Image: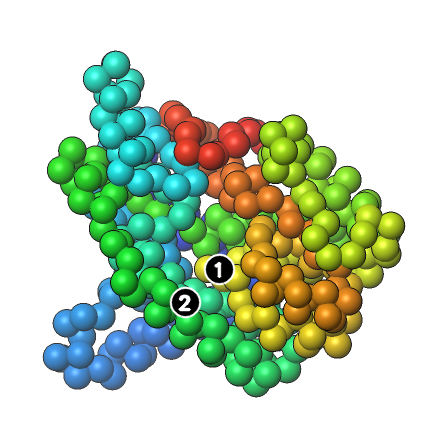
Amino acid sequence: MKVGEIYDLAVSMGMEADPRGLDKVREMLEKEKKKYEEMKEDEKKDFDLESLANPYSDTRILVGEWDREVKRLLVGIDMEVGEVLLADRLSEKGRPVELILSHHPEGKALAALYKVMHLQEDVLAQAGVPINVAEGIMSARIGEVKRTVLPLNHNRAVDAARLLGYALMSVHTPADNLVTSALQKAMDLKKPETVGDVIKVLKEEPEYAEAARLGAGPTVIVGSKERRAGKIMVDMTGGTSGSEDAYGKLAQAGVGTLIVMHMGEKHRKEAEKSHLNVIIAGHMASDSMGMNIFLDRLEANGVEVVPCAGLIRHRRS
């Protein structure tokens, strides 16, 4: 496969698994095209043309030719300067890679991470929170994340990859959509009764079973295993953690248990006030599951996958 083909596949799989629905995502892209067409010429200079076909600003080819042929790629959750050097070392030892694939965004994909957070507004609305309330809740949080990423040194890994001649790509929200969709379908199908039963369903997935053996498996941080789960919501996409103000609204909308990748202490306390059950499924395990669903498709197309940097590789096909 070529680098561009891998990128296009990631975007299309992410759109198909998007919690907003494929039609809604296509509608958003049409609005983006119309917005671009109405811009003045000087405004178009800084416009990200990729956003006309890719709704995920945290998923980009960061360096390298789109038509570069990829026979082997090095992939992990966080691919930074150390992993770029690891790719170079593998090449020296006779296992050359053409593409470095990161789940967490780097470069301009990291700088634009906050833009994908609007996805969470629609997720909250689907859970029963009025859309005007959802947008109001998320507005301050999106601004906070934007200000947080502004001063970061976004291009360290990108520069290292460029100097050593590697292509580098980030695939973030598409993979998060894949794991969110798969887990929500499993919960809706199996309808676990208690919080403990929810954890059992999670551990049926090999990434979570392996994470449990490593001491980083699914953990109840609000509630207890004996409590009834009620309505279960998998909340693992949309860039990063949303607003702590959302938990009270979700409880009012009838959500009983949240399954998340991670949660800060401030957010945990707010969820506790609303009597929600919260399960931390595990960050690396959840990211790994989403990436694995994507990586299986790459392997089916003849690309060799070399996992590292926290990726728990499991093949489903």
Q: Position of residue 171 (x, y in %)?
A: 39, 48
User: Residue at left 18%, top 75%?
Assistant: 44
Marks 1,2: beta carbons within 8 A: yes
Q: Quadrant of the N terminus?
A: top left
How far separated are the C-alphas under marks 1 and 2? 8 Å
For residue 145, the mark is 2
> Which of disc 2 and disc 1 is earlier in sequence?
2
- Mark 2 residue type: Val
Residue named by callout 1: 240
Residue 23 seen in this snapshot = no
Q: Secondary structure at mark 2?
A: helix
Q: Position of residue 207 (x, y in %)?
A: 60, 34
User: Residue at left 33%, top 56%?
Assistant: 110
User: Residue at left 31%, top 45%?
Assistant: 169
Residue 175 seen in this snapshot = yes
User: Residue at left 23%, top 46%?
Assistant: 156
Q: Is residue 167 left or right of residue 249?
A: left
**124 or 156: nearer the eye?**
156
Figure check: 199 above or below 222: above
For residue 44, the mark is none
Please identify the quarter of the rendering in which residue 305 is found: top left
